[in-house]
């Protein structure tokens, strides 16, 4: 169905379901091509629904085998059935049961939605609307039912049978070839949280006792032979459960908690009640096959899915427009967990890098939308950085606005009041308004208004009066469907930095709420600070207290002094990022002179040299972030229009080389000081040392290619972990030549049997910024390690190429044509992966005219392809609008 034929779903059109399903019994007999599903629905009219309404159940590519009302077969005239739905024309206007038999083919389900097979394992993905591919149902999040699930399968094929809730029965069937398991979940849930897994799996397990005294069996299931890589996921699960008890007062509520890793999965993971299903890249880890980044991601995503047990499962969404209610809040919770487990400043910097590169770019393009959209044609296309990452920033701002105490009271009230319900953003905010005594109606604009606000700041110091006046103003640019914007509520954490550090903040302004927080809730504001002995440097948006662009006219010298003196780690990092960004945006404009770049390189080189000499070993993880320049794609977004990707990349490479050259005398000694003879450990401190050491390796490879290449080869040969080997490979890709190709070959040989590691190998090559990369990628598509049917392989190789600024944006348009062709080919099998890949074109309007036209032509070819899925045609339509 093309999007022009698809109905536009509007928030304003929401109405409750006409029917409710109190209990739902499923009997599923698993078979690779003919899985039989019997559903028993205990229905009743919804008092809030329309009296006398027909019963309309959702379906998607289903085959109806039998239908009975209270045990009696229904006359054919009493219903209408198609693969896409089932309607009972005149159901009894009372409680009744309906039995539905369907048959499905898991092996043919390449969409990986509903029930499918992954490497011989039966598994499900039902969010957002995948359950309708298993059985006809009221597939909407506000219909919550108590599930009992009986699974049956060949014992040899599927010795492990898992579903939601607690295991209540299991036995062999007569003959011993087949067996069954019955699972019961006492907690009502919507269909999108249903899950099953059946297959031959290994597992690791341990017992856990909650703060309330409940004994829980924790288990992580993986493919045979991989149980040794599941320990970190299990350890992360235990730690996040304890953290949620301590910080949010949330205890687990079932007797078992199972995690299953599968190799074919569209998403990162899924929070199904009591049975989380994960992409195996976010479960499997050991030093030889997972990087420090993988360990951190596993820790965070295990936590994210577990935290959904309360913020998503116990309290779910009334409708999909409220998706941010569960996702934004849960991202905030997992970020806080990771901040407590690791370095809070470093975690904040990493999160803001992600926010800017993904969500700010989304806000700046044709796919911009509010955190709570008002309408959609395909809900799968709204699992976006805006909903997730910007949604988390809203929770962070809410906490800053009302304070820690009121925030905790609001969360407690939300858990108490909304438990067991399908809630809305209004329900959520009402709890915090009540807990804090604040009117949050203006703050709620964050959920309704798209776009990234710009905060413009300037200051004036009166030396005679020892007074500093700070002028603040905000604006938000137009976005699709929203040409007029209203002022937002911006919590601005600030400080005034003097020659010896922070200066005291004394002001009578009502906008200042104390503790370094100013609330800007109008278009502009002036605030005066008294008794300042010297002209200060304003330090604004400390801890990145609001997701806004800051325009503050500080000189490079002032920013470098801020880096040296500011007490806020985030703004120390931001100060040097601002110096680099200004130089790169100036130089990155087409045909711009690079004279300013050498001046900036000297200034940054001196500042970084001093920093590394004094503090480089004090917090290596922070130092690694400080050394990392803004990404070329971020610079392109800052330029904003008529972007020449080659010029942007050239400026970025020139500045990187110059900084590396300035630091070169210090780098070998510092790398040696960061070396460790101890066995690999994934802890934050050890990971930080490796991060800095490998950042230095990359600088050396740029500044002194011959010496850097030798170091890369030596590190690859001596490394006892994937983090260091992959860093050596990545640095070597910066140095063209036979040595690079040899190392690429050695890496492939070493990891020939490790698909997840080879994904990184594929991506490292796809990101090489050279003219031959497109042909390299095409050759790699024929490599045994690659499969267009596996989402991880596609994200590694094809997604990597789409993220290659210079080669995706080739001046001949070949990069655009290549990705467009892949999107069309993928769409036939897996529309979700195809639509995400098509999102690579979201910034096409900011390109210079030649590339802009070529990108538009490629998008047009996709849009005009007959038979496109709703997922892809929706993205194409909105991107071209």
Image (cartoon, rainbow, N blue to C red):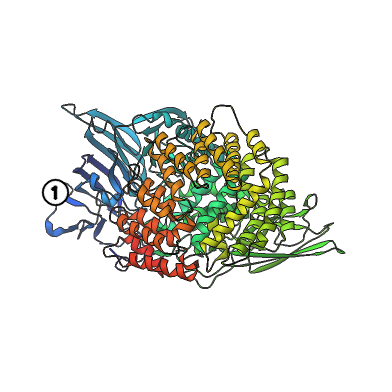
Q: Viewed as shown, does residue 94 lie left or right of 489? A: left
Q: Dot 1 surroundings within 10 Å: few (below 14), some, or many (20 or more)? A: few
Q: Residue furthest bottom?
A: 484
Residue 732: percent from the left, percent from the top? 51, 43
Residue at the location (53% across, 68% down)? 641
Counting from the top left corner in percent of width and height, residue 834 is at 35, 56
How many numbered discs sit on the rendered protein? 1
Residue drawn at (50%, 62%) of the image: 363
Residue 332 seen in the figure: yes
Viewer-nearest residue: 145 or 577: 577
Q: Check the picture and name the quadrant holding the N terminus.
A: bottom left
Instruction: Classify residue 794 as left or right of residue 736.
Output: left
> What residue sits 64% from the left and 54% below the top?
577
Camera-side residue: 27 or 737?
737
* Residue 85 spot, x, y in % from top left: 23, 57
Q: Which residue is mark 1?
A: 72
76 left or right of 11 in image: left
Q: Is residue 513 above or below residue 286?
A: below
Which residue appears farthest toward the right when viewing the image? 464
Secondary structure under the numbered disc 1 in the rendered image: strand
648 is higher (above) or lower (below) than 242: below
Residue 216: x %, y % from top left: 43, 31
Of the 4 image quadrants, the one containing the C terminus is: bottom left
Residue 190 makes an appearance in the image: no
């Amino acid at each position: 169905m093309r999007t022009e034929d698809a109905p536009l779903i509007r928030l304003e059109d929401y109405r409750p379901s006409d029917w409710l399903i109190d209990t739902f019994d499923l009997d599923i007999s698993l078979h690779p091509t003919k899985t039989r599903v019997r559903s028993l629905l205990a229905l009743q009219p919804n008092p809030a629904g329309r009296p006398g309404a027909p019963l309309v159940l959702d379906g998607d590519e289903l085959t109806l085998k039998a239908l009975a009302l209270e045990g009696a077969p229904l006359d054919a005239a009493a219903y209408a059935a198609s693969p896409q739905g089932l309607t009972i024309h005149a159901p009894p206007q009372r409680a009744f049961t309906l039995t539905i038999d369907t048959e499905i083919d898991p092996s043919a389900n390449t969409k990986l939605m509903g029930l499918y097979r992954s490497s011989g394992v039966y598994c499900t993905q039902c969010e957002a609307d995948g359950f309708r591919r298993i059985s006809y149902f009221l597939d909407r999040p506000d219909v919550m039912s108590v599930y009992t699930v009986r699974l049956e399968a060949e014992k040899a094929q599927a010795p492990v049978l898992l579903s939601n809730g607690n295991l209540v029965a299991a036995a062999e069937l007569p003959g011993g070839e087949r067996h069954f398991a019955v699972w019961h979940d006492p907690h009502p849930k919507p269909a999108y949280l249903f899950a099953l897994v059946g297959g031959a799996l290994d597992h690791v397990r341990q017992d856990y006792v909650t703060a309330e005294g409940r004994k829980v069996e924790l288990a992580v299931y993986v493919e045979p032979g991989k149980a040794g890589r599941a320990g970190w996921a299990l350890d992360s699960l235990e730690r996040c459960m304890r953290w949620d008890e301590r910080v949010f007062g949330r205890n687990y509520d079932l007797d078992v908690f199972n995690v299953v890793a599968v190799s074919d999965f569209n998403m990162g993971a899924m929070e199904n009640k009591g049975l989380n299903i994960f992409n195996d890249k976010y479960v499997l880890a050991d030093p030889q096959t997972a990087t420090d980044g993988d360990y951190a991601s596993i820790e965070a995503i295990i936590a994210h899915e577990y935290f959904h047990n309360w913020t998503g499962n116990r309290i779910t969404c009334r409708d999909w427009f409220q998706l941010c209610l569960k996702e934004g809040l849960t991202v905030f919770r997992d970020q806080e967990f990771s901040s407590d487990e690791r370095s809070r400043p470093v975690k904040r910097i990493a999160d803001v890098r992600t926010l800017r590169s993904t969500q700010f770019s989304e806000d700046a393009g044709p796919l911009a939308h509010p955190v709570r959209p008002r309408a959609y044609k395909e809900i799968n296309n709204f699992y976006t950085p805006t909903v997730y990452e910007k949604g988390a920033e809203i929770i962070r701002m809410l906490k800053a606005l009302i304070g820690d105490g009121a925030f905790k009271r609001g969360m407690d009230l939300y858990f108490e009041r909304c438990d067991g319900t399908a809630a809305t953003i209004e329900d959520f905010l009402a709890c915090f308004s009540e807990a804090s005594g604040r009117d949050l109606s203006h703050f709620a604009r964050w959920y309704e208004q798209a776009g990234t606000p710009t905060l413009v700041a300037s200051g004036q110091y009166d030396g005679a009066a020892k007074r500093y006046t700070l002028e603040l103003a905000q604006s938000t640019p137009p976005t699709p469907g929203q040409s007029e914007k209203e002022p937002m509520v911006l919590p601005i954490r600030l400080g005034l930095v003097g020659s010896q550090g922070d200066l005291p903040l004394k002001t009578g302004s009502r906008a200042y709420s104390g503790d370094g927080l100013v609330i800007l809730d109008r278009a502009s504001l002036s605030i005066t600070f008294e008794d300042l002995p010297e002209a200060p440097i304003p330090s604004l948006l400390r801890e990145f207290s609001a997701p806004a662009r800051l325009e503050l006219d500080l000189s490079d010298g002032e920013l470098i002094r801020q880096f040296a003196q500011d007490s806020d780690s985030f703004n120390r990092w931001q100060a040097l990022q601002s110096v680099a960004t200004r130089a790169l945006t100036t130089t990155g404009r087409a045909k711009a002179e690079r004279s300013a770049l050498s001046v900036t390189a000297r200034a940054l080189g001196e500042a970084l040299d001093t920093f590394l000499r004094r503090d480089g070993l004090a917090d290596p993880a922070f130092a690694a972030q400080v050394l990392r320049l803004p990404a070329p794609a971020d610079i392109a977004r800052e330029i904003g229009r008529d972007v020449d990707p080659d010029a942007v990349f050239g400026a970025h490479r020139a500045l990187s080389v110059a900084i590396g050259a300035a630091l070169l005398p210090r780098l070998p000694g510092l790398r040696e000081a960061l070396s460790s003879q101890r066995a690999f450990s994934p802890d934050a401190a050890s990971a930080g040392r490796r991060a800095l050491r490998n950042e230095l390796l990359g600088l050396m490879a740029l500044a002194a290619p011959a010496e850097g290449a030798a170091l890369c080869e030596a590190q690859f040969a001596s490394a006892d972990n994937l983090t260091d080997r992959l860093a050596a490979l990545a640095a070597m890709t910066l140095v063209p030549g036979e040595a690079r190709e040899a190392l690429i070959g050695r890496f492939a040989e070493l990891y020939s049997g490790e698909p997840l590691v080879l994904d990184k190998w594929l991506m490292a090559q796809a990101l090489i910024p050279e003219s031959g990369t497109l042909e390299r990628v095409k050759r790699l598509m024929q490599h045994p390690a690659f499969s267009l049917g596996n989402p991880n392989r596609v994200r590694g190789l094809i997604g990597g190429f789409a993220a290659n600024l210079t080669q995706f944006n080739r001046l001949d348009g070949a990069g655009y044509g290549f990705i467009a062709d892949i999107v069309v080919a993928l769409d036939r099998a897996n529309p979700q992966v195809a639509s995400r890949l098509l999102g690579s074109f979201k910034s096409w309007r900011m390109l210079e005219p030649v590339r802009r036209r070529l990108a538009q032509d490629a998008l047009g070819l996709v849009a005009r392809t007959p038979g496109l899925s709703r997922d892809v045609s929706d993205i194409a339509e909105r991107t071209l609008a």
